[in-house]
């Protein structure tokens, strides 16, 4: 498997779910990671965003275009 790199920070669960669906439809390998930590009750999500998406570097531009609405 290719090395995954952090592509973009996601602002909320809705954005994360929609992006995950679109990337799956297009066959783009990816991983959506949430910053939620049950021990801290999601403390970092308010400051750092909901989470982020990781994917191979070669997919960066396509993912950023999807996030931009393109």
Image (tube, grey):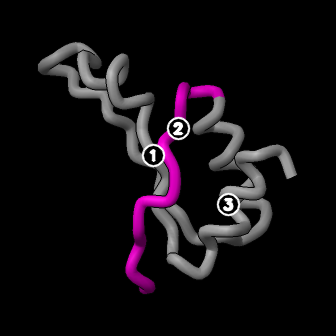
Inter-mark Cα distance, 2 to 1: 5 Å
State which tag comes first along the sequence, 2 or 1: 2
Give yes or no for contact between labels 2 and 1 (Cβ–Cβ under 8 Å): yes
Q: Is residue 54 above or below residue 4?
A: above
Q: Which residues are magenta?
A: 1-14
Question: Which residue in the structure is indicated by mark 3?
Answer: 63
Q: Looking at the picture, how far across and down is residue 22, in whole percent?
A: 75, 52
Q: Looking at the picture, how far across and down is residue 2, in whole percent?
A: 44, 85
Q: Is residue 36 left or right of residue 14?
A: left
Residue 10, labelled with which disc?
A: 2
Q: Secondary structure at mark 2?
A: strand
Q: Looking at the picture, how far across and down is residue 13, in whole percent?
A: 55, 27
Inter-mark Cα distance, 2 to 3: 12 Å
Rendered image quadrant of residue 23? bottom right
Please rate how many residues cluster around mark 2, counting C-alpha atoms within 10 Å: few if below 14, some from 14 to 19, many from 20. Answer: many
Q: Is residue 41 left or right of residue 57?
A: left
For the point 30% across and 28% down, which residue is it?
36
Rendered image quadrant of residue 49? top left
Please rate how many residues cluster around mark 1, counting C-alpha atoms within 10 Å: few if below 14, some from 14 to 19, many from 20. Answer: some
Question: Does residue 7 show up magenta in the picture?
Answer: yes
Residue 52, labelled with which disc?
A: 1
> Outermost residue toward the bottom?
1
Q: Is residue 29 left or right of residue 19?
A: left
Q: Secondary structure at mark 3?
A: helix
For the point 13% across and 20% down, which residue is it?
39
């Amino acid at each position: 498997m290719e090395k995954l790199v952090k592509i973009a920070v996601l602002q909320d669960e809705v954005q994360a779910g929609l992006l995950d669906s679109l990337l799956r439809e297009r066959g783009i390998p990816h991983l959506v990671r949430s910053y939620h930590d049950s021990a801290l009750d999601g403390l970092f999500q308010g400051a750092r965003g909901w989470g982020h998406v990781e994917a191979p570097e070669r997919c960066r531009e396509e993912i950023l275009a999807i996030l931009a609405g393109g």
